[in-house]
Image: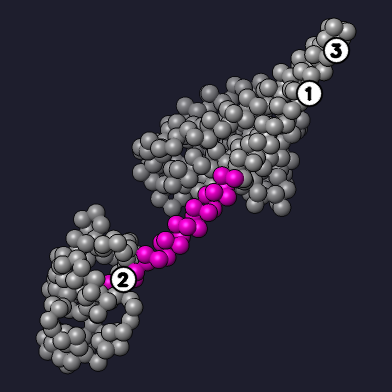
Amino acid sequence: MPSELSFTQFPCAHSHSCPFSKAPCPGVCVFADGMQSMHLGILVLDVSRHMVVFENQVARQLLDMVGDHSYQGLASLLMKGGGTFEGLLGDHVEGDSVRVGCRLYGYSFYRSDGFVWIFLLDITERQRLEAIAESVEQMNSLGFIFSAVRHELGNPIHSIKAAVSVLRNGLDRFPKETVADYLESIESELGRAENLLRSLRNFSLFEQPEMKAVDLASFFAQLKPLVEPDLRTRGIGFDIEVSLGLPLVSADVRALHQILINLVANAAEALEGEADPRIHVRVASSAGGATVTVEDNGPGVPRHLLPRIFTPFFTTKEHGTGLGLIIVKKMVTGMNGTIWMEPVRPRGTSVSFTLGGA
C-alpha cells in the first residue's frame, strides 16, 4: 500500500475478495483499524496479482526505511535463496530474520486462499538478551572446563612431584627395585596427563567439517576390516548390519570414521571380562537420512547416569578422561546430527546418532 493512501482502505477495493472475511471488499476495511495499533507488522500479498494489498502502520514504517513497498521489493528483502511467495508450501511457513538499519526483525508467512500474510516482529532486544545469556553460559562453561582440566592435570602432576621428591631424598639408599617402582609410577602418571592432552587436542579437530555425499554401505565395508581384527584378538564378536536402499548422507568422512572408532572402542572397553562379548552396529534409513547404532552386551550404564553421559569430564571408567563422548557429540552435532544413549535389555548399551540426507 503506498504511504499516501488512507490507512483504512485497500487498493483492491470493489474488485477483489477480502483476505480477512473472504467476502467482496466494501472499500472501507473494518478490520484495518484493529491492526493499526498492533506492535506486530502485518502485510497481506495477493500472489495471483503480484501486489501488496495491505500493510499496517508498523509494517509501513519498516518499509519506509527500506524504501521499497512493492511485491518484488518484499520478495528481494524476505525470500532468501531466490524463493518466491508463490512457491511457499503449507499454511504456516517459518521465516527468518532481516536487519534494517540497526534493528533486527523476525518474520514468518501464512498462506490463505491466494493470499500470503507476512508477520514481522522487532526482535532486536530479544537477540541482545539472548546474546548476553549465551555469553554468560559460554563463560560458565569455560570456567567449568578450565577448572576440570586443572584438576585432571593437577592430580598426576602432584603424584609425579611427590615421587620425584621421595626419590631425590632417598636415591643413595633405595634399592634398584624401589627406584624402578617409583619410575614406573611416574611413567604411569605422565601417561594420564598425556592422554588428557591428546583428548583435548582431539576436541578441536574437525572444527569446520568437510561435508560431502557419503555412501554408508561403502563406508562401513571399508571400516569393518580396520576394526574387526583387533576385536577378534580380544575375543569380541563384531558384526555390521547395513539396511538395503540407504540414501546418501551428508557427512565429513574423517569425523565419521573417528566417531565410529571411538564408539566401538568404548563398547570394547565395557566388555572386558564379559562372557560372550559382542558389538553390533546397525545402519538404517530414517527421516530422509540414516541412523547409526553401536550396541554392546556389556554391563550397561545405570539409567540415572544417562543424563550426564555427554557431560565434559564425566566418566564411568577408572582411568577415563570423560572427554571421549563429548568429542563424539561435538563431531555429530557439527554434521547437523543428534546423538543419544539408551540401555539395552536384558544387558548392554546402545549409542545412536543421526545423519541427514545429502
Secondary element under disc 3, as helix, strand or loop, is helix
Q: Is residue 278 visible?
A: no
Q: Which residue is mark 1?
A: 162
Q: Would you name the residue on which mark 3 appears?
A: 170
Query: Disc 2 and disc 3: Cα gap in Å?
Result: 78 Å
Gap in angstroms between the C-alphas marked 1 and 3: 12 Å
Residue 123 sits inside the magenta stretch: yes
In terms of sequence position, does the residue under pointer 1 or pointer 2 come before the other? Answer: 2
User: Which of the two labelled residues, at mark 1 and mark 3, occupies the earlier sequence position?
Assistant: 1
Q: Residues within 10 Å of mark 2 (few under 14, many from 20)?
A: many
Q: Residue at x 78, y 23 (%)?
A: 162
- Neighbor class of circle 1 (other Cα within 10 Å; few <14, some 14-19, many 20+) is some
Judge by depth and name the residue closer to the eye, 289 or 115: 115
In the rendered image, residue 268, in percent from the top left (x then y), is placed at 66, 31
Residue at figure coordinates x 73%, y 48% from the top left: 302
Q: Residues within 10 Å of mark 3 (few under 14, many from 20)?
A: few
Q: Nearer the viewer, mark 2 or mark 3?
A: 3
Q: Which residues are magenta?
A: 114-143
Which tag, 2 or 3, sits closer to the chain's start?
2
Q: How many marks?
A: 3
